[in-house]
Amino acid sequence: MTQKYLCRDCGTKIRFKGEEILNGKMLAFDTDNNKKDLTYIFKCNSCFEKDPSLTNYQETEVYSRVVGYLRPVKQWNVGKKAEYGERKNFKVD
């Protein structure tokens, strides 16, 4: 296994022997409620014993203003999303 997996809570390296997790647990969650695309998070045994739940795992929902209304960017059409991606941030002194 070439990919490096870390505990989500403390950053401890998760070790494997083949497919077996030696020092942790794998938790799965679904971000789009479709049960097809699950996201996997690892916790070391120590952190899992302290708190076995998976908290604070949702993606941040970004809101922006279009024609005077605040709307989640996720709900925009393709053209508006492209325009949002081209926007530049300016810092005013």
Image (spheres, rainbow, N blue to C red):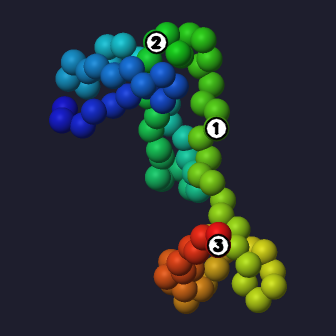
Judged by depth in the image, the label closer to the viewer, 3 or 2, is 3
- The residue located at (31%, 14%) in the rendering is 22
The amino acid pointed to by label 2 is Asn
**In the displayed image of the protein, which residue is found farthest to the right?**
68
User: As drawn, is 63 to the left or to the right of 17?
Assistant: right
The amino acid pointed to by label 3 is Val
- The residue located at (56%, 47%) in the rendering is 30
For the question of whether residue 25 can be seen, the reply is no
- For mark 1, give the secondary structure: loop
The amino acid pointed to by label 1 is Asn
- Residue at image mark 1: 56
- The residue located at (20%, 23%) in the rendering is 18
Tell me which numbered mark, 1 or 2, is placed earlier along the sequence: 2
Q: Position of residue 48 (x, y in %)?
A: 53, 16
Query: Residue 46, relative to residue 77: is it above or below?
Result: above
- For mark 3, give the secondary structure: loop
- Asked whether 63 or 92 is in front, the reply is 92
For the question of whether residue 14 can be seen, the reply is yes
Q: Spatial distance from mark 1 to mark 3, Cα to Cα?
A: 33 Å
Judged by depth in the image, the label closer to the viewer, 1 or 3, is 3
Within 10 Å of disc 1 (Cα), the crowding (few <14, some 14-19, many 20+) is few
- Asked whether 47 or 85 is in front, the reply is 85
- Residue at image mark 3: 92
- Which quadrant does the N terminus fall into? top left
Residue 11 placement: quadrant: top left
Q: Position of residue 89 (x, y in %)?
A: 56, 73
Query: Residue 56, relative to residue 44: is it above or below?
Result: below
Q: Residue 74: which disc?
A: none
Q: Residue 45: which disc?
A: 2
